[in-house]
Image: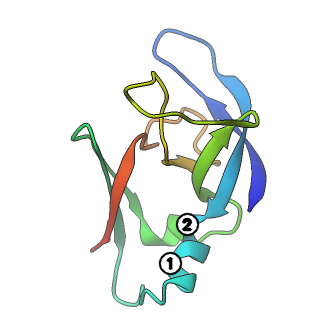
Amino acid sequence: MVDVEANLKRSGKPAEKHVYTGVLLKEVLEEAGVDTAGKDTVIMKAVDGYTSAIGMEETLQDDNVYLVFKMDGEPLGTKEEGGSGPLQVIIAKDPFSQRWCKFVMEIELQ
């Protein structure tokens, strides 16, 4: 578990720095024994139907793609609670947070 600082950019508002707590997605995949060979895309699916895709190369970078459960020391909360969790995928090196995925329920490799 690590803390990572990333910019959250909401529509029509300036970017805000937040500290997220979670784990690198690549470490989750490794720990689960998932074979990433021959896969080039990571598809994240959310409970609200939203889908986001990122490249495998980007996912396997150090200090970039995280599966998080806290923001600024507080649990993300569920959609029903007005939160963005309980799990969210963030991309630390994405300055606009456009490909982040709130309410993650499934991650698929293609």
| Left or right: 57 in relation to 52 | right
Residue drawn at (51%, 19%) of the image: 10
Q: Position of residue 66 (x, y in %)?
A: 59, 57
Q: Give the amino acid type for the residue marked by disc 1 in the picture.
A: Leu
Report helix, strand or loop for mark 2: helix
Spatial separation of the CA atoms under disc 1 and disc 2: 6 Å
Query: Would you say the residues marked 1 and 2 are in contact, meaning their CB atoms lie under 8 Å apart?
Result: yes
The disc label shown at residue 29, or none: 1
Report helix, strand or loop for mark 1: helix
Q: Give the amino acid type for the residue marked by disc 2 in the picture.
A: Leu
| Left or right: 61 in relation to 59 | right
Q: Position of residue 85 (x, y in %)?
A: 48, 40
* Residue for badge 2: 25
Q: Position of residue 103 (x, y in %)?
A: 39, 42
**Picture quadrant of residue 98:** top left
Residue drawn at (34%, 68%) of the image: 41
Name the image quarter holding the C terminus: bottom left
Residue drawn at (75%, 48%) of the image: 4
